[in-house]
Amino acid sequence: MAKTFKILRFDPLVDKIPHFREYRHDPKPTDSILEALKDIRDQQDPSLAFRYSCREAVCGSCGLTVNGKICLACKEIVGRIDADLIVVEPLPNLEIQKDLVVDLAPFWEAYRHIEPYLQPEGEAPPGGHRVAEEKMEKVYQYITCILCACCYAACPVASRDGRYLGPAALAKLYRFVRDPRDRRPFKSLAKVDNPAGAWGCDTVFRCNEVCPKSVRPADGIEGLRRTLVARRTKRLFKGKR
Amino acid sequence: MLEHDILIVGGGLAGLAAALSADPALKVAVVSKVHPLRSHSVAAQGGINAALGNNPDGKDDTWQKHAFDTIKGSDYLADQDSAELLCRMAVPAMYDLDHWGVPFSRFPDGTIAQRPFGGAGFPRTCYAQDRTGQVLLHTLYEQCVRRGVTFYEEWLVASLVVRDGRCLGLVAYDMGNGEILPLEARAVIFATGGYGRVFLRSTNAYINLGGGIGMAFRAGVPLKDMEFVQFHPTTIFGKNILISEAARGEGGYLVNNQGRRFMEDYAPKAMELAPRDIVARAIQTEVDKGNGFANEYVHLDLRHLGREKILKRLPGIRDICVNFLSLDPMDTPIPIQPAQHYSMGGIDVDADCASPVEGFYAAGECACVSVHGANRLGGNSLLEAVVFGRIAGASASRYVKGSSPPGAPERSLEDETRRFGDRLAEIKRRDTGENVFRLLNRLKKTMSDNAGIFRTAKPLAAALEEIRELRSAYPKAFIFGSIGKYCQELLVLVEFGYMLDVAEVIVQGALLREETRGSHYRRDFPIRLDAQWLKHTIVAWTEKGPEMSYRPVKTDKYKPQERKY
């Protein structure tokens, strides 16, 4: 059934402010919003800009707002939307570059800040690390994160305080903290022991709600808080490490 | 002008592996048309092969046996010394990846877990659930962040600049700033991935247009074995999203509309775990015989694996089915059909990833060393990207340190930049023209219709005809929006030109190769003919069109035999 797609448009060379443009399009009920956008672009308006890549919810390119819901355009299926009007906007709280493309620089900056890499001891052990599967499973919840920035866009703290690192970066840090091979020093953790880090979260769980990969980033923030308290207490009694 | 020692084009697994192995004393940068984490490597699911011998059923595995399986799987078109290099380097590479942070699944003794995969004599595919590509790409990117690698993200490379057989650099479109600019480099490594989206039905990301392969070809680098296109047996019906070979590795069945495991008619010993070319043809044959569902697909049945195994080993597959098919594989079989998946052929390079053009290297899916020959085994593509990415980074570093800079490269680079700017200005002087997205859709359709799993001379010739028509329409392609920031029309307009070359070379090679080998199945020539055709196809660009020649395959170790599974 044909639907009206009301899409936010902004071309910095032409427009002073963003505006909506409407398109009539008849998608299959099994089509995703991403497929609908592609068809609208291919058939009606080649100038429409939006990010995309894998179309299977694993690359994290196509975070958008569809009828007010923050989601991946490729994962949102038209037949499951009970409305004739589909409003498509960019992710909120990020500067619009063109049409549906936003500037993710603050998101990536937060990611880089937490030292997002394993910090193991010494050289690679011969035959690889020996790790019990139950211990490796502790990171599985967090490695499904595709860094799509949906949680960052939805987070009320990130929207009012530009210094806050946001859910994805903090959950990513917790992924490494949980990794049995990681030996990062306390000073690496101390970088988030403040209101711009683990203590900034308002625990309203908007991140858990919008995450298209069911990561539950707030669990990671909660875990970081526990880890910080435990490590600080340990240092008090054992002297600095 | 931006100057570098080494520029790596492509931020997928091969590109990042190259960046990590390049000499840290050199000035290196990665140029990618998307953020590196959006690269198609992220979608690989099942695993990466290395003869670690961790599986209790794989204790006797060796890299030599891995090499033999790879060579047999290739239908003997792989260069045997290169396949050996790949498999030998696989083992230390796994331990490095583990130490860099890849969260591999584990066996009870704590070692890296390994599962069975198609065409392999032992269970040797290392994995992290069914998200292996995702964790590999994220881990390598994390290591690049640790080392402070420079990235030019969302920059489209528009052309490769070569003068007198020597690579000088690139011209790129910086999408974030809307600028076109030259980049000088002593060496360039292409890690630009495959061309899946030359086909309509493909498992590949939308961004896999294959422009890099065509760009190298235009700049004078030959292509090799381009007619060998892998069709993956199991992709979800309609959308062609990949269902990993791991689903069969873990014990999944392929079933036709009579409820029969039909693979017993095609590969009675290996059954569902025969190599991909054989399984894909079997599925298509069943559908063509009327044994499919809706004349389109067969079933992949995972129900007998049980809830626990599916949730633990194949959670990503389950998510894909629930989300994109609205079905749960724990209760319902998955409708699957074959679709284009991988390019065995590519830019002609040697085992050092060096091409005939001085200072130009290629690695990963865009390159052809060749290790996959006429058919790639599952679990060998992530491996190739890591191993040859690292080799390319080291080779390019050696080259830069051991050669003197070319004289005055700026002029050629500026000329090329100006030519590109003039071309865009010409487009904007017009009022209208062809919609390049529509031209692209026509190309995809003709490739899927005429150069798919089963090939014959007539449809191949028809595809060539359509490609020539599209080529004559291409100069009329128009950009409807403004040419500034994030002009995605410009991106597709540039790549489409190169895609026409890629498609033509695939079809031309397929038409000329009058035999059947691996993925290349000619209904009109259904037998492998070693006496005539045990050779690589080499294609060079000329003004008059692609010029074909042939090169012997290195087969010193294993004599080609009939391939039975």
Image: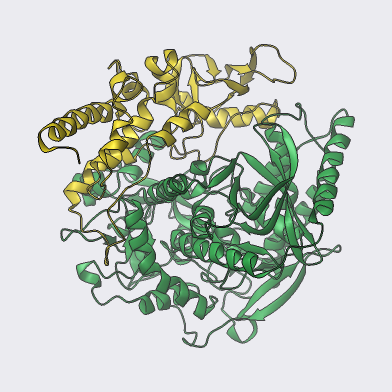
Q: Residue B543: where, in percent of width, then height?
A: 86, 62
Q: Residue at x 75, y 26 (%)?
A: B481
- Residue sitting at the far left: A237
Residue B260 visible? The answer is no
Which chain is in green here?
B
Q: Can you tell which quarter of the image residue B360 is in?
A: bottom right
Question: With B370 as the anchor, is B244 left or right in this view?
Answer: left
Question: With B81 as the anchor, is B356 left or right in this view?
Answer: right
Q: Residue at x 63, y 76 (%)?
A: B536
Figure check: B184 above or below B407: above
- Residue sitting at the far front: A239
Residue B149 visible? The answer is yes
Q: Residue at x 33, y 31 (%)?
A: A191
Q: Residue B201: where, in percent of width, then height?
A: 56, 48
Q: Nearer the viewer, residue A90 or B25?
A: B25
Q: Residue at x 60, y 45 (%)?
A: B32
Figure check: B192 above or below B321: below
Q: Residue B551: where, in percent of width, then height?
A: 66, 80
Q: Quadrant of the C terminus of chain A?
A: top left
